[in-house]
Amino acid sequence: GENVEQHPSTLSVQEGDSAVIKCTYSDSASNYFPWYKQELGKRPQLIIDIRSNVGEKKDQRIAVTLNKTAKHFSLHITETQPEDSAVYFCAAADSGTYKYIFGTGTRLKVLA
Amino acid sequence: GAVVSQHPSWVICKSGTSVKIECRSLDFQATTMFWYRQFPKQSLMLMATSNEGSKATYEQGVEKDKFLINHASLTLSTLTVTSAHPEDSSFYICSAPGQGQVIGNQPQHFGDGTRLSIL
């Protein structure tokens, strides 16, 4: 089955700096890669996603890149703000079953 | 947008009690729903896929008789934790793929989660 690894587990950056979180997946059949932000005790919130036919996608301060050959994808947050502090999860989804397999999460702290 | 409602949001009960958690898609039909468990400071672990009108599909290591899943309608899936013990204490979250989207390539909509504490 699919296995998703995520690094780093914790990340501290100064306000205004960029943050990068990386994930790798094992199943070449996975073709959808969402990123979720989760605040303590709350539901995961989708922040950006990318499909396997695209190499990069950007939405304001957030971007995601995908390298299908290497089976890795990354989340980039620019001009970080304190409200970006949360736990971020990547996931890989199988095209036939809808199933998400989540990465282990990254706790991002943006220092003011 | 698509909304998934989960109830209750918090449950505290004694060891040995069975607890039922409901997951409803409010404005769309969901033939498939997913149940996740999340321990503190850990990731979301997929427990099972709930299929409307048929048996749920459980992930490896998840006890079918312990975590009963029923998906009797297109808008409701329930997870029952039977004879719950303190080690079952966790955050349980359901999700559903939105209706009318490309199969296999769409965001899922998550419920607010249920925090289960077994004393």
Image (cartoon, rainbow, N blue to C red):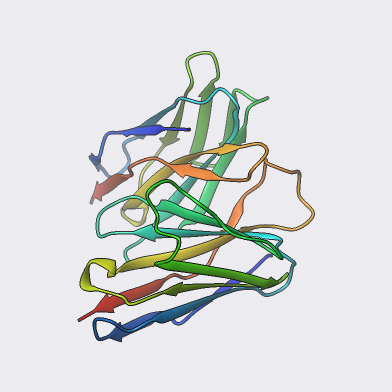
Determine the image quadrant of residue A99: top right
Q: Quadrant of the C terminus of chain B?
A: bottom left
Give the left or right position of residue B104, taking residue A8 as reference.
Answer: right
Give the left or right position of residue B46, taking residue A82 as reference.
Answer: right
Q: Quadrant of the N terminus of chain B?
A: bottom right
Q: Residue B68: x percent and y percent?
A: 49, 69
- How many marks on residues? 0
Residue extending farthest to the right is B100
Residue extending farthest to the top is A69
Residue extending farthest to the front is B65
Give the left or right position of residue B8, taking residue B4 as reference.
Answer: left
**Vertical position of residue B100 compared to residue B115: above or below:** above
Q: Residue A26: x percent and y percent?
A: 46, 25
**Foreground pick, B2 / A31:** A31
Determine the image quadrant of residue B15: bottom left
**Foreground pick, A18 / B112:** B112
